[in-house]
Image (spheres, grey):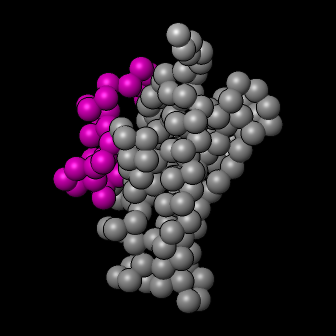
Amino acid sequence: MVHRIAYPRRGELYIFEDTRRVNGYGHSAIGGKLKDSGSRSYRFISKEGRNQTEGGGNEIIGGESKFINNYYSSYESMINSEDISGKYNKMMTIKKLSYREVAQALNAAYESATSRYHFIFSNCFHVVKNALKSIGMYDGGLGTFIPNNGFYNIYYQYKPKKWYE
């Protein structure tokens, strides 16, 4: 007889939304709990638009991305960081994930955040969408290149455990 060890599913993903940014179309970002304790327990990733330096492309063709990829020792230090505090007016928490799923999702988010920026094909919401898609939770839908639409699609599809306004 084979016995399996049941590991508690204490990983969490946090999806952040600022419904006011980008002329009301919104801005999305993602974070997660990677482990119970330690200096790199929490991670936050956001694609912040196009790098506007010389050679950075333009609105039509896109360009090199600006992004945030930071680690934190606690939930409180992440939420109160200058990356998040006061910048988002909505957040949802997806609970009962394994730490492996959270790591996989955040690695997919990082890959998406560092890819070339385009306001339709590779924007801030694609970071969230690709993270959730990597763990089989969400693959998008109509209008999900608009961050606010994608955020609410996730909310109505999954009814996450926590909802903050």
Q: Residue at x 56, y 56 (%)?
A: 110
Relative to 4, say whether 12 is above or below. below
Task: Please state which of residues 54 and 158 is positioned toward the viewer in this rendering.
Answer: 158
> Residue 157: in sight, yes or no?
yes
Relative to 126, say whether 16 is above or below. above
As drawn, is 144 to the left or to the right of 89?
A: left
> Residue 80: in sight, yes or no?
no
Q: Position of residue 89 (x, y in %)?
A: 46, 38
Identify the image quadrant of the C terminus. top left
The furthest residue to the left: 142
* 140 within the magenta span: yes
User: Which region of the structure is painted magenta?
Assistant: 138-165
Q: Residue at x 42, y 78 (%)?
A: 62
Q: Position of residue 115 (x, y in %)?
A: 51, 69
The furthest residue to the front: 1
* 25 within the magenta span: no
